[in-house]
Amino acid sequence: MKIKRGITRTVFVTRRWAIKVPSLRAHGLGVSGVLWSISRGLSANLSEREWSGQRGFCPLHFSLWGVVNVYPRADVCTEADEPIDYATIADYPLAVDPKPHNVGRLNGELVWIDYDMNWNDCLACSRQAARQTTGSG
């Protein structure tokens, strides 16, 4: 098993699964930093739970109220995989962080593996904006 640490979440990567949990990192801010990290990690997991199931996003296999999210393991892209046409990965023209390590290959398809959308207001608002942008609304 590998352990990957992001700013707000820790990911445990097994042979078959990627398990995301809120991070307990203090970011040099003591208890308030830990609480910030936990709340942002929980929020990110809940956001991905809402967006899972859309084309181009790594599907969520299981979520325990956003505290633990379990995904099928995807092969993470690297700089060697560039150029990646990020705009064509998903149906929605979202402002996801376009970095190779936020994208992976699952069953031969490119998918976003880190797609926290909290800054897009709410799911219903974001989907409506996406439909208006793509003309399918």
Image (cartoon, rainbow, N blue to C red):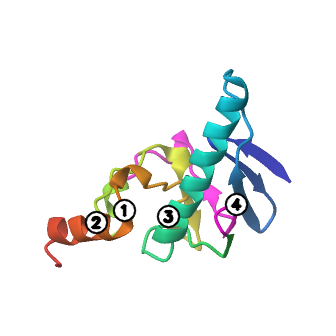
What element does badge 2 sit on?
Answer: helix
* 10 Å crowding of disc 2: few (<14), some (14-19), many (20+): few
> Measured from the top left, where is residue 122 in percent x and y?
36, 62
- Decide whether residue 105 is among the magenta residues: no
If the image is split into quadrants, where does the N terminus sit?
Answer: bottom right
Q: Amino acid at mark 4?
A: Val
Q: Is residue 7 above or below residue 53?
A: above
What element does badge 3 sit on?
Answer: strand
Whether residue 7 can be seen here: no
Measure the C-alpha gap from mark 2 to mark 1.
5 Å
Of the numbered discs 2 and 3, the one sitting upstream in the chain is 3
> Measured from the top left, where is residue 90 in percent x and y?
37, 66
Measure the C-alpha gap from mark 1 to mark 3.
21 Å
Q: Amino acid at mark 1?
A: Cys
Q: State the residue at coordinates (43%, 53%).
A: 118
Q: Nearer the viewer, residue 14 or 108?
A: 14
Q: Which residue, given by chain and number where applicable, does mark 4 sit on?
A: 67
Q: Are circles 4 and 2 on residues that touch, CB within 8 Å?
A: no
Of the numbered discs 4 and 3, the one sitting upstream in the chain is 4
Highlighted range, magenta: 65-85
Q: Which residue, given by chain and number where applicable, does mark 2 sit on?
A: 125
* 10 Å crowding of disc 4: few (<14), some (14-19), many (20+): some
Q: Is residue 96 above or below residue 90?
A: above
Q: Are circles 2 and 1 on residues that touch, CB within 8 Å?
A: yes
Q: Which residue, given by chain and number where applicable, does mark 3 sit on?
A: 111
Name the side, left or right, on which 73 lies relative to 117.
right
Kindly identify which numbered label has been placed on residue 122. 1
